[in-house]
């Protein structure tokens, strides 16, 4: 599974202005609603419920908020770079500036877990996070994400 299968060029937010975890989730839900056609509030509530189980901040300035939703036919992703790192209650207590939202169909099961693992693997590749933090525009951000997927296929 490549990240190119999960994310489209218009699913990249190069400079999110969120000042808090809740605000970031709200903006991700808004973009998620745009690309999926689902209700923004439903996406937001699903993501908040998941965060209550434990932070999706995986460390190294990276968070992978995710949720399963009725009405989706396939897995969708949104990538966002936060202009100023925010507290996401991450496992390493470091602020987060790279977010990858994953929205999966309610019955996705193993595909949802495979997609999460793929995203985590690519974002932890040496140099990928640095390149995402320094890419000057959405096209380059998208390129880093999808190129990482093709060069590091597992």
Image: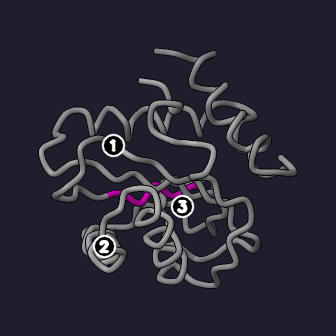
Q: Nearer the viewer, mark 3 or mark 2?
A: 2
Residue beneath disc 2: 39
Q: State the CA–CA distance, disc 3 to disc 1.
A: 28 Å
Q: Residue at x 58, y 55 (%)?
A: 62
In-image side of 38 versus 69 (left or right):
right
Element at label 2: loop
Q: Nearer the viewer, mark 1 or mark 2?
A: 2
In-image side of 33 versus 61 (left or right):
left
Q: Which residues are magenta?
A: 62-66
Q: Earlier in the sequence, mark 1 or mark 2?
A: 2
Q: Residue 116 in the image: x percent, y percent?
A: 38, 41
Element at label 1: loop
- Mark 1: give few (<14), some (14-19) or many (20+) Cα within 10 Å: many
Q: Residue at x 37, y 56 (%)?
A: 36
Residue beneath disc 1: 75
Decide whether residue 88 is among the magenta residues: no
Q: Residue 55 in the image: x percent, y percent?
A: 39, 67
Q: Residue at x 23, y 43 (%)?
A: 73
């Amino acid at each position: 599974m490549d990240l190119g299968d999960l994310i489209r060029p218009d699913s990249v937010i190069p400079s999110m202005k969120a000042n808090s975890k809740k605000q970031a989730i709200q903006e991700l839900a808004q973009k998620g609603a745009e690309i999926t056609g689902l209700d923004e509030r439903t996406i937001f509530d699903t993501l908040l419920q998941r965060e209550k189980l434990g932070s999706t901040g995986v460390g190294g300035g990276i968070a992978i908020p995710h949720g399963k939703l009725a009405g989706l036919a396939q897995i969708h992703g949104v990538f966002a770079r936060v202009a100023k790192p925010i507290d996401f209650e991450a496992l390493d207590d470091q602020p987060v500036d790279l977010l990858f939202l994953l929205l999966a169909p309610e019955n996705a099961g193993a595909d949802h877990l495979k997609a999460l693992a793929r995203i985590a693997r690519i974002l932890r590749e040496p140099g990928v996070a640095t390149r995402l933090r320094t890419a000057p525009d959405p096209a380059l951000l998208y390129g880093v994400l999808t190129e990482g997927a093709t060069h590091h296929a597992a």
